[in-house]
Each structure stands twice: as structure tokens, then as C-alpha cells.
Amino acid sequence: MEETYVRHVELLGFEKRSYPSQHYVYMLMVKWSDLSEKLIYRTYPEIYTFHKLLKEMFPIESGEIEKKDRIIPSLPAWRWPLSQKSPETRQSTLAEYLHSLTGLPPHIARCRQLGRFLRVRPEDENPPAPNTLKRNETFVVSRELARGNASEISGPILLDTYRVIADFTKTSKHEIDLHTGDLVEIVEKNQNGWWFCQGESKRGWIPASYLEPLDGPEEAEEGEPDYEGEMFVTHKAYKAEQRDEISLEVGETISVIHKLLDGWWVVRKGEQTGHFPSMFLHRAGRQEVHEAERTTLQGRRPPPRRSTIRNAKSIHSRARQRLSQDSYRRNSRRYLQQRGAGSTKEAAEAPLRERKNQDNVPETSDSSSESEPRKEAPVIPPRPSPELIQERCSDNTRNKVSVHRGGGNIQVQRQAETLPEIKGVQFDLFFAHFLRFLSFFCANVLKKKKLK
């Protein structure tokens, strides 16, 4: 049975995505020899890597030996900074490149590598979930452009511009040389710390640690630490070279608590934390690394860290803020203790809730009782003054208190008026003596009344 091959590739447009970081993907409609049509998504760096592979496989047809023998088309750049070509023209050249691949001789157009590159991947059928804060933006190519007639596209491609902080010398054919102060546009920010850049006349990969934003030292797309962590598994061993790094063997399961754009993530194993290359990790439950990722990682080393770069020159007076490993460990330990205390409390309350449910006793919410304000103690009213007592007592009592006794007039009201202002303890003693006298006097009056 003849193996299916690609009959036609059509560029439909591109999509701007924000997860896991901002990047663009091309939407390609691939038509196969069995008359099936499949929609796939490919980034420009992936197309660029495949183009390099195609030139290595067919050096004669690519013009590596004799330029006159070249039949493999040149891959157009993502954009042309030195020219005035519009995004529409750039899209058109890429559409022409993809279309011309299927018109090459059968030993190239029907080769296994081309079919493997354009075959549907799992992420093509189930694209990654979009960012909750930023929605994906789709830009569609017009019909005239798809047919080869240069026309218009529904939106422009805007790339972020970064500055190089130190000289970088490439160590592989996929990288590019850059000098301090060069400005480059970022085509793709890969999570492994290697970014695909476009310079004035060259394009390729460069470590993110050699780049800084123009607006400020901080990365707007870099998230905050998540001490709950995401479970990842190491598929390659690494031995720590810096004090804030961690050594791990193949197959170890760890928690990623902070994803940094330079490709050196902060991971946690037990109570230990440290930086570890993200390119040596894959999500737990994923049996193997995707083939495209394996191809990208071939011959690729972890990117250098910012702290190891010599003669780095930044245009920003304020340095980039970084948490120390002590802070990561302290915050991580605090989070685990709080989570452990919460789970212990829930485990202790579970039998009680189950018993209440069996007895049909309604549950009471502790949180609601804690949230309600506690009832304050009643306010003690002030002690009544003698004038108030005289005003509110009965006429009989008022007359008895005001009687003459011996040679002196015991007039409580007058004495209260002439009494000097007494405060604090002295007033309390005075009022106590007054009440004692009043009770004694009333008792004598009642006694005399009985004798009569």
C-alpha cells in the first residue's frame, strides 16, 4: 500500500497566543493524497528548523555545492527590517514557499521528513487552553492572497524588541552572534530559555538571559511563584553548578513553584528548593517528550544564567528583582505547614460530621461563628447623684429625709448643693456613708411609728 503524501499546503493565516508566553503560530491547511484535509499549527522557528534539515538532506538541490543547481526555495524571513515590505507581502512569500515545496521533484516533495513535519499532532487537535486574561487573536489571509495574488491580511504582526546586554558567540549553526547594544525582535519565547530572534540580517536562537526589555528590567510576562506547585518529571539528569541550583537524577518527580522566562525554573523536592533547567522536565503523567520537542532539544544545552554572564551592561539603573532561595524555602515551608494544618483539621472534623449526619443533626459552621462579632459586656450606668435621688423618690421619703433633728437641720438637698465636688474614691465613700445614714434613719422612723 502506497504511503500517503502531501499534495498541497495552503496558508490560512496566523494566530497570536499568550500561553505559555506570547508567540505566533501559522494556520496551515494540508491536503493529502488520500483526499483528506487537516488543519495544523506551526511556529516560524519550527518551519525554520525544518528548512535547515531539508537543506542538509539535499545539499545539491539546495545549492550548497553549486548555486545554479538550487531548486529548493529560500525561506523568507519572519519580517524584513531593512525594507518597506508590508506584512501582506511577507505572508505572501511564506505562502509561496509552502506551496512550492509540493511542486519539487517526488524524492523531495514526498520524502518522509516532510510528511512527518506536516502530520497532525495532538496539540493541533487540542490546542492549549488560552490565557484567562488574554484571549487568542486570529488573523485570516484573504482569498486573493491564498491564491497567490498579493492582497491584504486582517491584522499586522507586532514583535517585542529587546536589547543585548553582552556579547554572545554562537556554538551551533542554529544560533547567531550578537554584540552588546544590538536590538533584536523576538519571534518566539520558548520556555526552555532559548528565544528565536530576528536581527537586521540574521535570525536564530539566543539565550533569554542575554536580553533585556527596553521599558524596564522586569519581565511583564513573568508570573508570580505558585507554592502549591505543578508536578513534573525529569527526563535528563543535571548536577548543580551554582549554590542556588539543585541536582536531580532521571525520573525524579518534583514540584515547579516558579516558572522563569530564562529557562531556569525554581523546583521543590521535599524541603529543598533550587533552580533547574526547564528543558530537562516534562509534565507528570506524560509518558514521553513530544517528537518536535526532542528534535528541538537535540544538541541543545541549557542556556547560561544571567549571574554567569561577564561584562553585562544594562541600560536600566535598577537591577532585576529576584527572590533568594532562602525566601523560596521559607515561603514554601510556610505554605506546606498551612496546608498540613488545614488537612489535619478536616480529618479531625470528618468523624464528627459523619456522626452528625447519621443522627440527622444539622451541621454548624465554625467559620460563621468566628465571623460573627462577640457580644460585648453590658455598659454599667453611672451612679445617680443626690439631686436625682431627691427628684425621683416618693413624697413620703422626701419629707422624712428633710425633717429637723436636734439643733441641726439635716437637709440633704441643701447639703448636696453646698457639697464640694468630690471625684473618684472620695465620692464613692461619701455616697456609701449617705446610703448607710439613709437606711438607719428610715429604720428609726419605722420603729417609732410601730411604738405609737
Image (tube, grey):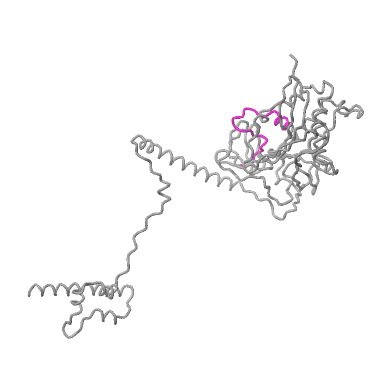
Residue 159, given in percent of the width and then of the height, sits at 75, 43
The N terminus appears in which quarter of the rendering? top right
> Front-most of 144 and 385?
144
Choose top left, top right, bottom left or bottom right for residue 91.
Answer: top right
Choose top left, top right, bottom left or bottom right for residue 20.
Answer: top right
The C terminus appears in which quarter of the rendering? bottom left
Residue found at x 71% / y 29%: 39
**How many labels, in total?**
0
Residue 123, given in percent of the width and then of the height, sits at 66, 31
Residue 443, given in percent of the width and then of the height, sits at 15, 72
> Front-most of 222 and 152?
152
Choose top left, top right, bottom left or bottom right for residue 391.
Answer: bottom left
Residue 296, given in percent of the width and then of the height, sits at 73, 32
Q: Is residue 124 above or below residue 186?
A: above
Q: Is residue 107 above or below residue 78?
A: above
As drawn, which residue projects farthest toward the bottom?
Answer: 407
> Front-most of 226 and 14?
14
Residue found at x 72% / y 25%: 37
- Look at the image and say whether residue 26 sits in the magenta stretch: no
Q: Is residue 215 left or right of residue 55?
A: left
> Front-most of 103 and 49?
103
The magenta-colored residue range is: 274-298
As drawn, which residue projects farthest toward the top?
Answer: 1
Q: Is residue 134 above or below residue 407?
A: above
- Look at the image and say whether residue 279 sits in the magenta stretch: yes
